[in-house]
Amino acid sequence: MHVHAHPDDESSKGAASTARYVAEGAQVHVVTCTGGERGSILNPKMDRPDILENITEVRRQEMERARDILGITQHWLGFVDSGWPDGDPKPPLPEGCFGLVDLEEATEALVRIVREVRPHVMTTYDERGGYPHPDHIRCHEVSVAAFAAAGDPERFPDAGEPWQPLKLYYHHSFNRPRMQALHDAMLQHGLESPWEERLRDWKPEPEWDARITTRVRCDRWFGVRDQALLAHATQIDPDGFWFAIPRELQAEVWPHEDFELVTSHLPDHPDATVGQVTEDDLFAGLLDHPDRTGGRI
């Protein structure tokens, strides 16, 4: 189960790994916390009055297309996009948005889905949200709380039979070593890198990058990832930076997606050591576990 803040996040973070696991027979479920109603239209070709007037429905249709491309199932958690607070000082978040929702209320909503779907593995964002969007921060908080509460019969007793997922991961796809490697490869091939300006302002944090514990090889599914991204036409510009680096070069330089194992309840699979990549599979240690119900789920 991947828990994401907005429609399009499931396609921009971990989508190639998702496609790999679906191809291998896993049941992959996405929970989308908000409808993305306040997301900016980032594709100039879609910046039209008719799209803006119907943005809620448009983004739901985009999610449906991406869902079909990835082969996943999905729940909407049902909260309202907080938008990106812009300005200095930043304005207050809009009343009723996900970033302000009561943590217990949102946690119970996610616990209900966890107990219904019964995932063995959950992924979400790190404590920074991947980037500091208020919905991403809230998504992290709600996901961590739900992971801890879902197996506790005393928490939310009316939200279904308790179920404890066995592993919790954070996404680390947008890490500096990856972007630096792709940038360097572009320059070596005489190509213009879309990451030059960003890397110039991106302060190295080796201790942060060392948190990666798990690298899932998934380059065979980069094409599926890209098709899922393109389904989110309001958010993804086909002529933008998402597709500026040739897919073949990505596969050569960085053929995997990166995660951090945060919690493991497997008795013979202790938490991975910080600063050491010890796994190549989100399901490592699970296939012989007694809670496995068949297939890679």
Image (tube, helix red, strand yellow):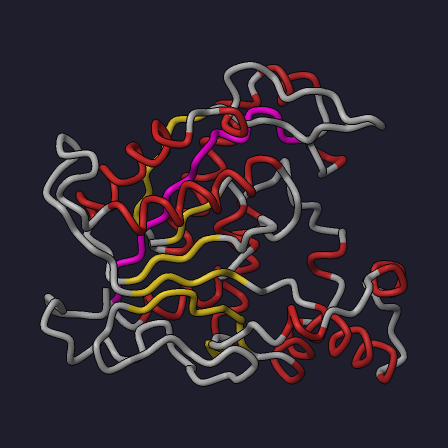
In-front residue for pair 63/211: 211
Residue 246 lies, in percent from the top left, at: 71, 71
Q: In which quadrant will I find the N terminus?
A: bottom left
Q: In which quarter of the image is residue 102?
A: top left
Residue nearest the observer in this picture, 70 or 86: 86
Residue 179 vertical placement versus 65 (above, below) = below
Q: In this view, does 205 lie to the left or right of 155?
A: right
Left or right of 16? Residue 24 is left
Q: Does the magenta stretch include residue 27?
A: yes
Q: Which residue is drawn at 60% across and 35% down?
A: 134
Residue at (79% x, 81% y) in the render = 185
Q: Position of residue 192 (x, y in %)?
A: 88, 68
Tell me what residue is drawn at x 50 percent, y 40 percent: 5
On the rendered structure, is 78 left or right of 41?
A: left
Name the spot of residue 223 as percent of width and height, x first. Answer: 53, 66
Which residue is pictured at 77% across the width and 26% down the height? 90
Numbered marks: total? 0
Q: Nearer the viewer, residue 193 or 216?
A: 216
* Magenta run includes residue 197: no
- Residue 94 rendering spot, x and y as whole percentages: 61, 17
Quadrant in which the C terminus appears: bottom left
In the image, is residue 106 above or below residue 208?
A: above
Q: Residue lying farthest front?
A: 154
First to last magenta residue range: 26-39
- Specify whether 67 is left or right of 175: left
